[in-house]
């Protein structure tokens, strides 16, 4: 069985953020880091080359494949920030709440469990923080933290 390609690394989040080329993206990455720390209460960990994760969970599919992945996080990508919100995958009620919040968020686009934001000025940061909180809480209900 294959292993996840995206795993925690020894790279520090601070050095990664400081290496972001574009000054605005770098500043916004620091702002997002502060928001995610506030919501999750977790210090960030680098996952792969460019994902900043907060907390982790263990999953197991019916196929037998299993692994660990970040509970939530973001990546200051060149084009847009990617915000990882997995809670909507876990619960129908969270998916519904996400839709309500996304309608108020501001300019964004979406993938399955990703939210894409060009710049933070395009969105309501209070709504973004609520989205992170709602999805963090859902992940903790579905995948209770160990300990």
Image (cartoon, helix red, strand yellow):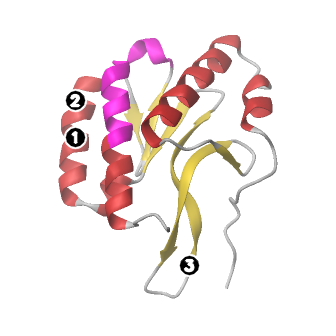
Q: Real-space Cα distance between discs 3 and 2?
A: 34 Å
Quarter of the figure with residue 104:
top left
Q: Is residue 124 depicted above or below 91 in this figure?
A: above
Instruction: Give the residue number, with chain letter if any, for mark 3.
Output: 66
Q: Which mark is residue 141?
A: none
Residue at x 72% of width, y 36% of height: 13
Neighbour class for label 1 at 10 Å: few (<14), some, many (≥20)? few
The residue wearing badge 1 is 99
Q: Position of residue 119 (x, y in %)?
A: 50, 18
**Looking at the image, which residue is at 47% across and 17% down?**
120
Q: Secondary structure at mark 3?
A: strand
Compute the Cα span from label 2 to label 1: 6 Å
Is residue 61 found left or right of 81 in the rendered image?
A: left
Say if mark 3 contacts mark 2, CB within 8 Å. no
Discs 2, 1 touching: Cβ within 8 Å? yes
Horizontally, residue 58 falls left or right of residue 25, namely left
Question: Which residues are the magenta region?
Answer: 119-133
Q: Is residue 21 above or below residue 37?
A: above
Q: Which mark is residue 103?
A: 2
Any magenta on residue 1?
no
Locate residue 76, reporting x and y percent: 62, 30
Query: Tag 1's secondary structure?
Result: helix
Q: Secondary structure at mark 2?
A: helix
């Amino acid at each position: 069985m294959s292993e996840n390609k995206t795993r925690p690394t020894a790279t520090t989040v601070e050095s990664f953020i400081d290496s972001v080329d574009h000054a605005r993206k770098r500043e916004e990455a620091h702002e997002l880091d502060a928001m995610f720390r506030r919501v999750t209460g977790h210090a960030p960990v680098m996952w792969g080359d460019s994902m900043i994760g907060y907390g982790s969970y263990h999953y197991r599919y019916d196929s037998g494949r299993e692994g660990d992945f970040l509970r939530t996080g973001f990546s200051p990508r060149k084009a847009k920030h990617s915000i990882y919100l997995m809670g909507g995958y876990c619960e129908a009620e969270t998916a519904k709440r996400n839709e309500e919040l996304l309608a108020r968020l501001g300019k964004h686009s979406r993938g399955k469990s990703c939210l894409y934001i060009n710049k933070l000025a395009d969105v309501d940061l209070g709504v973004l923080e609520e989205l992170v909180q709602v999805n963090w809480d859902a992940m903790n209900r579905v995948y209770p933290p160990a300990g």
